[in-house]
Image (cartoon, coloured by chain):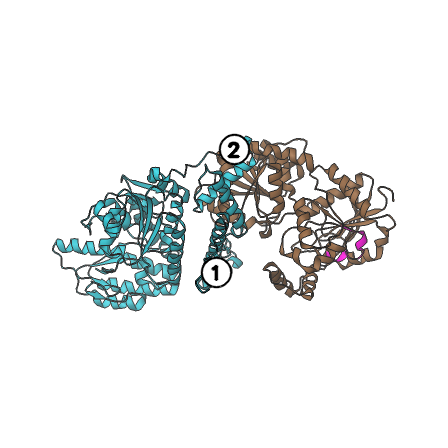
């Protein structure tokens, strides 16, 4: 086996330059990174862009997007009636039989054409890289040729992770790539015989410069503000964050505006509408400017496998206030020394009070964050590790 | 006079009684009708339209009918629009039959006068029938005008202490001796009906860590109605106080005399209310010359206007700080809020400060100077974190705007709230109790293992 031989397929369920979703974004960067290093890389994905509707929005077939070959397959996105009930039972901790788990998995979005393409063409590829683990595409397709299947796992401590359904994926794949020690710890905790695995980190692009004042001017933002970037949905802690901030604001204790970018409905509580500014989906440069302009970045999600956004905040010199329920994010905050965590509304309020009352100290707190990101999470370092693992776990003739 | 009346122990009853006494001193012939058996001349169940219509039969023949108004006297619990409309119509009939009606408002929900529903229209009409409405603050005058469309000329602000008569002749030393309180103690007092919106638990939590050097907090009162939620609250309050040195809960009947004796015995009266319109306790405390710490709710700020010795606080942290100032040397172990650590002190120091400040607001004693104690607070917080992260449950927001979907959601929410809200309340109560329980277990564990019970004879 020689270096960089064989075709590597990256297989996200959705793909595009405007997809909001950490796993999909990372996979895209990784694909381009390996392609740049000389790998023969292809994207296998679906025609859907929205992970809520799974509506077919792009054309099936092969295209070349920004120099990257992309092979799209249509989606059967209509969820069966029982999916909601089964999903509810999973999320509320009600044990499902294996049969029910399988019905749950197969009652939502599916991509039979993609499945069959891999089934038909697996010999043409050295490796398939899937993400994230709970999606049908990963679950179903990674088991077609498991000895070629590498998972960018994106495992976090959520009810799905404990489903017996996923054990074969965690134990039988060619390899599992983890982004952090806590993610690996969790995998080892829930699986007795874990497949080969490695913590490789996650790459973050380092902006050459920032324009915070320009961002403020272009979006008409005055005064101090907190930033949230990402999908605005309950699972990301968005609704809960709004409720807490609205409550603080109602007591006259909230000297900030909340600026948000990304996808999903904003839905601020009554009375808090004037304190939330949605700047929509921003390109990378403007995104970085937003991070630099913010007084603090809020990460309210408990379900993070890595949290690129906190890295982007730290790179921009912005302190992070994060939900302590995410082991990974808490680990980053403690390791970097550049972020505070909260476990309830009062702790969030006190952390905000720190930013409000001691802004210079808050900014100083963030300084070590940039160094932390630069030391651990530059793409070149991560790509070195990913390459090494693909070569170790798969072979050209496999 | 239509009012609760002694010997029922109730702030409104005491207020009514003193007003009756004053009127009679002025030579008026006053008869009293109360909602239940009491020292009043008559009693009548006033709840619901039937009660109001029964009242309508009684008011004829009096030159003046004075109603001490609280919604609970007239509206059934959880009254919906139709109930409020029916009661409003019946009360309007009663007021129409009287020669002159004056209403002293102790509490009212202004929301019920807003909007265009039949219930709102009837409620506005009801209040317009009243010849004179007495409230305790100017903000209530404004609210009445805005919500019910009542003309200012029909509303007056009355001094709730105008008819004050002390019920005890004792001085502080005698009162303390009678209650078994040390003469040199610093006594905080929260007194009144024990129910969640009075927030006595806030006072107990705020007091945590101050019960040294003779500083004490006494919570005195009874459960007004045997509502399971109120009874449970009282039980929880006792449990909470049992954990906090220096905090005492005295549940039981409190006569007017005993009520005043407690106030006289105290140094500072604490009113940690979550909701209230005005407070007769504040009035009596001030009239006895006691200092008052009160939360900024309702019209308490106006009631305390220009009175020396009243401290208004915005939140639990403010309450605790105010009590700590009053506690003086007895609370030397608890220090003022420390400034935020610098970034140079490290992330851990700032994070610890965040956790400690939040813990204090949850009612923990936070002795900043003692590293072992700080570690205990942080460790306990880590144990309860998974439960605290759950947060409170709320009914889903129906959204805003005018679309059909939003309208349907709002209707569904209104129709089902009476069934769903108690479940939501219970869930939140369970969560809070769980947090408290695991923190207590954690604290006990950090203090060392529980000693094994001694073997029993023959066991």
Q: Residue at x 51, y 43 (%)?
A: B378
Is residue A137 among what the camera can see?
Answer: no
Which residue is nearer to you in this view: B87 or B40? B40
The stretch drawn in magenta includes residue B186:
no
Q: Which mark is residue B413?
A: 1
Tell me the colour chain A is drawn in: brown
Residue B24 picture quarter: bottom left
Which residue is nearer to you in this view: B124 or B281? B281
Which residue is nearer to you in this view: B242 or A54? B242
Please say if A259 is above or below B221.
above
Q: Residue at x 13, y 53 (%)?
A: B26
- Rate crowding at label 2 as few (under 14), some (14 to 19) or many (20 or more) other CA atoms within 10 Å: some
Question: Chain under label 1?
Answer: B
Question: Chain under label 2?
Answer: A
Report the side of B88 relative to A14 (left or right).
left
Tell me the colour chain B is drawn in: cyan
Please say if A307 is above or below B403.
above
Q: Which residues are magenta?
A: A139-150
**Mark 2: secondary structure:** helix
Q: Position of residue A393 (x, y in %)?
A: 80, 48
Total numbered badges shown on the rendered structure: 2
Q: Position of residue B226 (x, y in %)?
A: 35, 63
Q: Which mark is residue A359?
A: 2
**Mark 1: secondary structure:** helix
């Amino acid at each position: 086996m020689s270096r960089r031989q064989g075709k590597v397929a990256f297989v996200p369920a959705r793909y595009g330059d405007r997809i909001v979703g950490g796993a999909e974004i990372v996979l895209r960067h990784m694909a381009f990174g390996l392609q740049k290093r000389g790998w023969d890389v292809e994207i296998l994905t679906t025609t859907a862009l929205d992970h809520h509707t799974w509506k077919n929005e792009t054309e099936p077939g092969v295209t070349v997007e920004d120099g990257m070959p992309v092979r799209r397959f249509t989606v059967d996105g209509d969820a069966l009636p029982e999916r909601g009930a089964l999903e509810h039972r999973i999320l509320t901790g009600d044990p499902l039989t294996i049969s029910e788990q399988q019905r749950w998995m197969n009652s939502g979005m599916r991509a039979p054409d993609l499945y069959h393409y891999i089934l038909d063409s697996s010999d043409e590829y050295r490796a398939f890289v899937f993400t994230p683990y709970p999606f049908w595409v990963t679950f179903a397709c990674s088991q077609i040729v498991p000895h070629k299947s590498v998972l960018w796992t994106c495992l976090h401590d959520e009810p799905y992770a404990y489903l017996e359904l996923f054990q074969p994926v965690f134990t039988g794949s060619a390899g599992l790539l983890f982004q952090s020690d806590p993610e690996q710890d969790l995998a080892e905790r829930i699986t007795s015989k874990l497949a080969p695995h490695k913590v490789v980190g996650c790459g973050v692009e380092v902006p050459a410069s920032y324009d915070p004042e320009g961002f403020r001017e272009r979006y008409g933002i005055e005064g101090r503000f907190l930033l949230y970037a990402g999908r605005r949905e309950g699972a990301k802690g968005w609704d809960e964050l709004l409720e807490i901030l609205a409550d603080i604001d109602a007591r006259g204790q909230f000297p900030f505006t909340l600026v948000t970018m990304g996808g999903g409905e904003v839905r601020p509580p009554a009375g808090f509408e004037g304190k939330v500014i949605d700047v929509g989906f921003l390109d990378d440069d403007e995104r970085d400017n937003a991070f630099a302009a913010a007084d603090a970045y809020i990460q309210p999600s408990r379900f993070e496998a890595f949290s690129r956004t906190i890295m982007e905040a730290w790179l921009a010199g912005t302190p992070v206030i994060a939900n302590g329920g995410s082991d990974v994010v808490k680990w980053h905050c403690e390791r970097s020394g550049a972020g505070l965590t909260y476990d309830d509304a009062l702790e969030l309020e006190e952390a905000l009070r720190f930013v409000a009352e001691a802004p210079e100290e808050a900014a100083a707190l963030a300084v070590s964050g940039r160094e932390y990101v630069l030391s651990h999470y530059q793409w070149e370092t991560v790509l070195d590790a990913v390459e090494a693992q693909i070569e170790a776990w798969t072979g050209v003739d496999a | 006079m239509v009012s609760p009346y002694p010997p029922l122990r109730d702030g409104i009853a005491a207020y009514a009684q003193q007003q009756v006494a004053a009127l009679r001193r002025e030579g008026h012939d006053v008869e009293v009708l109360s909602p239940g058996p009491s020292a009043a001349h008559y009693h009548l169940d006033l709840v619901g339209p039937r009660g109001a219509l029964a009242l309508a039969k009684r008011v004829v023949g009096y030159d003046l009918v004075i109603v001490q108004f609280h919604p609970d006297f007239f509206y059934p619990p959880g009254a919906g629009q139709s109930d409020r409309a029916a009661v409003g119509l019946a009360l309007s009939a009663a007021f129409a039959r009287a020669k002159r009606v004056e209403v002293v408002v102790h509490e009212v929900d202004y929301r019920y006068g807003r909007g265009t529903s039949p219930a709102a229209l009837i409620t506005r009409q009801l209040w317009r029938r009243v010849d004179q409405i007495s409230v305790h603050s100017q903000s209530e005058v404004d609210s009445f005008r805005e919500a019910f469309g009542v003309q200012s000329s029909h509303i007056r602000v009355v001094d709730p202490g105008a008819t004050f008569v002390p019920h005890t002749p004792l001085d502080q030393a005698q009162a303390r001796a009678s209650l078994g309180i040390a003469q040199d103690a610093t006594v905080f007092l929260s007194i009144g009906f024990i129910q969640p919106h009075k927030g006595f638990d806030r006072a107990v939590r705020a007091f945590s860590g101050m019960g040294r050097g003779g500083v004490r907090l006494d919570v005195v009162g009874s459960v007004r109605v045997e509502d399971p939620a109120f009874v449970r609250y009282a039980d929880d309050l006792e449990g909470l106080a049992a954990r906090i040195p220096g905090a005492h809960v005295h549940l039981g009947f409190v006569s007017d005399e005993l009520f005043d004796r407690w106030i006289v015995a105290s140094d500072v009266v604490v009113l940690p209310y979550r909701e209230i319109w005005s407070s007769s306790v504040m009035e009596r405390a001030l009239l006895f010359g006691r200092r008052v710490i009160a939360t900024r709710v309702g019209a308490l700020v106006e009631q305390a206007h220009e009175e020396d010795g009243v401290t208004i606080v915005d939140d639990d942290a403010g309450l605790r700080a105010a009590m700590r100032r009053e506690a003086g040397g007895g609370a030397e172990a608890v220090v003022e809020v420390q400034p935020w650590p610098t970034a140079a002190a490290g992330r851990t120091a700032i994070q610890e400060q965040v956790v400690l400040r939040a813990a204090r607001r949850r009612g923990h004693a936070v002795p900043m100077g003692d590293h072992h104690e700080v570690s205990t607070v942080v460790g306990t917080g880590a144990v309860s974190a998974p439960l605290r992260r759950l947060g409170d449950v709320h009914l889903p927001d129906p959204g805003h705007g005018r679309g059909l979907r939003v309208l349907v959601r709002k209707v569904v929410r209104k129709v089902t709230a009476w069934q769903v809200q108690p479940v939501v309340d219970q869930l939140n109560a369970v969560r809070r109790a769980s947090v408290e329980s695991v923190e207590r277990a954690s604290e006990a564990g950090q203090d060392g293992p529980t000693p094994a019970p001694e073997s029993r004879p023959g066991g």
